[in-house]
């Protein structure tokens, strides 16, 4: 009977480990810190991140031998450390899977570095999709 | 008159003669109204009788191929007694006068090749055009995905659907000849739900429709847009559809007022998906379920063939429409609610890393990438009771 208890606990916890897809208005306040950083507005960032990760803090996408992690889809090629690419420059000095939890402070720290060094075009979605009609990315609930 | 004499005195406490007359007039008008209503009711829904009764000639729809074949204006058929059913193979005459509505651009074209069915009621010879909004709609529906679906049972529940997933309304002539194209690979469970929910809805919407499941053969990356192009081509070999609904297999509308047919502008149907909190994720979003008329589709050279993997092709299509001067028509967010069958990401349909670069160049690529560059090989066509499945080899990323 006792052996069922851990199993039960795991079963209860399982739903908690599903992808956390945030809504626009949940993400909006979390990014306050980045508003105006390097002259990029919050709606621009909101648009870019939607197209990058659909606001899924646990998004993980692998392409052509590299992987992108989290809300900001930060790549292990250059910016963080992972087993897949041990030789990465790891500019943000952090393990990539730290970008898959709910705490966005490290994601934001690294995203700022990306904006400093590479610019907004790191996120390929920005140019084709996030240069016009930006009002829709505001969140009126605030 | 005698009864009224005592009352015609017109004293201060009693109503005067003029008021009496007014009341009588009112009763007379009501009686007339009731009489006319009764006549309408008895004449049934065949409203074309009424102009005849009143003596107004019914105008024929000019220029339609069918009219010449029938050769008889409706008024000649009204001459008393039972009439023989229309000969099989004659075209039905859609009711004229519907073209005033703005959305009628995709409406009745030439009434060609519509086979009219001999009707049991000998009083109605030609069918009227189906109304702008179907009277059969029920509104919001409960959509769930927790019960098993047996397609044999679904076929029994939808006996009017013919083999290959074809249905034509019998009570009226639909101006909407709709081919519903579903891009597909290894999603049989989702397809079962789709068929279970959509067939009743599409019939209630009084559409002349067919269901085409375009199944990608092989193990290459999934290419949704190319499959849709194939669907367009192949469906037209079956019937002269004038409208194409492109639907993902896992999206179910929650309100049958959300019309699965074409409008004067390209139509976005899945505007409020549960996955996106029942709202439009962004105004330029054109994914999920959409409808383009044959003309709209041809004017953008169809869809791109070079989007392998997930994402971007719907944004490319949006760009194409904008570059050809079109705009997106949508239902409101309440009627447009849709449920998506939750599922994990498919293998061989990972996000396409090239998608953002590609959508930045739609303006140039649309000229050479589309219907005019479409090549494929049909491997198999199966006509199941509820749908036609076309298995196709669409090649590999070049």
Image: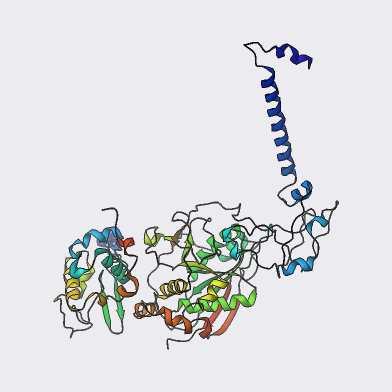
The image's colouring method is rainbow
Left or right of B62 in this view: A18? left
Which of the two residues, B357 or B250, is positioned nearer the viewer here? B357
Left or right of B205 in this view: B330? left
Question: For the view shown, which residue lies furthest in the left direction?
Answer: A93
Instruction: Give coordinates of residue A102: x percent, y percent.
Output: 22, 64
Instruction: Give coordinates of residue A121: x percent, y percent.
Output: 26, 77
Which of the two residues, B72 or A48, is positioned nearer the viewer here? B72
Up/down of B123 relative to A46, above or below? above
Which of the two residues, B367 or A68, is positioned nearer the viewer here? B367
Residue at position x 76%, y 66% in the image: B67
Q: Please identify the quadrant where the C terminus of chain B is shown.
A: bottom left
Residue at position x 22%, y 79% in the image: A76
Up/down of B76 relative to B165, above or below? above
Question: For the view shown, which residue lies furthest in the bottom direction?
Answer: B398
Which of the two residues, B120 or A10, is positioned nearer the viewer here? B120
Q: Report which quarter residue B379 is drawn in.
A: bottom right
Instruction: Give coordinates of residue B217: x percent, y percent.
Output: 50, 82
Residue at position x 34%, y 65% in the image: A133
Up/down of B220 relative to B15, above or below? below
Residue at position x 65%, y 16% in the image: B15
Q: Report which quarter residue B176 is drawn in.
A: bottom right
Q: Please identify the quadrant where the N terminus of chain B is shown.
A: top right
Could one spot residue A57 in this view of the protein? no
Left or right of B152 in this view: B279? left
Could one spot residue B67 in this view of the protein? yes
Instruction: Give coordinates of residue B221: x percent, y percent.
Output: 42, 81
């Amino acid at each position: 009977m006792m052996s069922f208890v851990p199993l039960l606990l795991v079963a209860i916890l399982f739903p908690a480990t599903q992808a956390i897809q945030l809504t626009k208005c949940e993400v909006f306040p979390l990014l306050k810190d980045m508003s105006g950083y390097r002259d990029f507005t919050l709606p621009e960032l909101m648009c870019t991140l939607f197209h990058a990760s659909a606001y899924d803090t646990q998004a993980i996408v692998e392409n052509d031998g590299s992987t992108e992690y989290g809300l900001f889809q930060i790549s292990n090629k250059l910016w963080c450390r992972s087993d897949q690419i041990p030789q990465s420059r790891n500019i943000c000095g952090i393990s990539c899977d730290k970008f898959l939890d709910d705490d966005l402070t490290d994601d934001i720290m690294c995203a700022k570095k990306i904006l400093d060094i590479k610019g907004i075009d790191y996120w390929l979605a920005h140019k084709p999709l996030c240069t016009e009609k930006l009002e829709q990315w505001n969140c009126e609930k605030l | 008159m005698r009864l009224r004499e005592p009352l015609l005195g017109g004293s201060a406490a009693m109503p005067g003669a003029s008021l009496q007359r007014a009341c009588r007039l009112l009763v007379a008008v009501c009686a007339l109204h009731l009489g006319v209503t009764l006549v309408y009711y008895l004449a049934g829904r065949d409203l074309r009788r009424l102009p005849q009764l009143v003596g107004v000639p019914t105008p024929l729809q000019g220029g339609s191929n069918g009219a010449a074949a029938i050769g008889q204006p409706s008024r000649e058929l009204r001459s008393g007694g039972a009439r023989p059913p229309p000969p099989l193979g004659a075209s039905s005459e859609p009711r004229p006068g519907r073209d005033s509505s703005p959305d009628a651009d995709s409406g009745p074209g030439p009434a060609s090749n519509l086979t009219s069915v001999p009707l049991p009621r000998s009083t109605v010879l030609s069918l009227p055009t189906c109304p702008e909004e179907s009277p059969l709609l029920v509104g919001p529906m409960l959509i769930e995905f927790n019960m098993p679906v047996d397609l044999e049972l679904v076929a029994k529940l939808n006996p009017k659907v013919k083999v290959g997933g074809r249905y034509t309304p019998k009570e009226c002539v639909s101006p909407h000849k709709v081919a519903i194209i579903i891009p597909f690979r290894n999603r049989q469970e989702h397809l079962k739900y789709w068929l279970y929910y959509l067939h009743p809805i599409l019939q209630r919407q009084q559409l002349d429709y067919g269901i085409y499941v375009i199944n990608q053969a092989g193990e290459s990356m999934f290419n949704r847009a190319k499959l849709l192009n194939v669907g367009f081509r192949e469906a037209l070999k079956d019937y002269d559809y004038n409208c194409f609904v492109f639907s993902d297999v896992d999206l179910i509308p929650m309100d049958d007022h959300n019309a699965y047919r074409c409008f004067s502008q390209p139509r976005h149907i899945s505007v409020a998906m549960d996955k996106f909190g029942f709202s439009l994720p962004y105004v330029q979003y054109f994914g999920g379920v959409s409808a383009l008329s044959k003309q709209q589709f041809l004017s953008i050279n169809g869809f791109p063939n070079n989007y392998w993997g997930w994402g971007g092709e719907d944004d490319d299509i949006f760009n194409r429409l904008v570059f050809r001067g079109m705009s997106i028509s949508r239902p409101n967010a309440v009627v447009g609610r849709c449920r998506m069958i939750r599922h994990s990401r498919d293998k061989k349909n990972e996000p396409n890393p090239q998608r953002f670069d590609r959508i930045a160049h739609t303006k140039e690529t649309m000229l050479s990438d589309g219907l005019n560059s479409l090549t494929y090989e049909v491997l198999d066509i199966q006509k199941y009771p509820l749908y036609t499945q076309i298995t196709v080899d669409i090649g590999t990323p070049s």
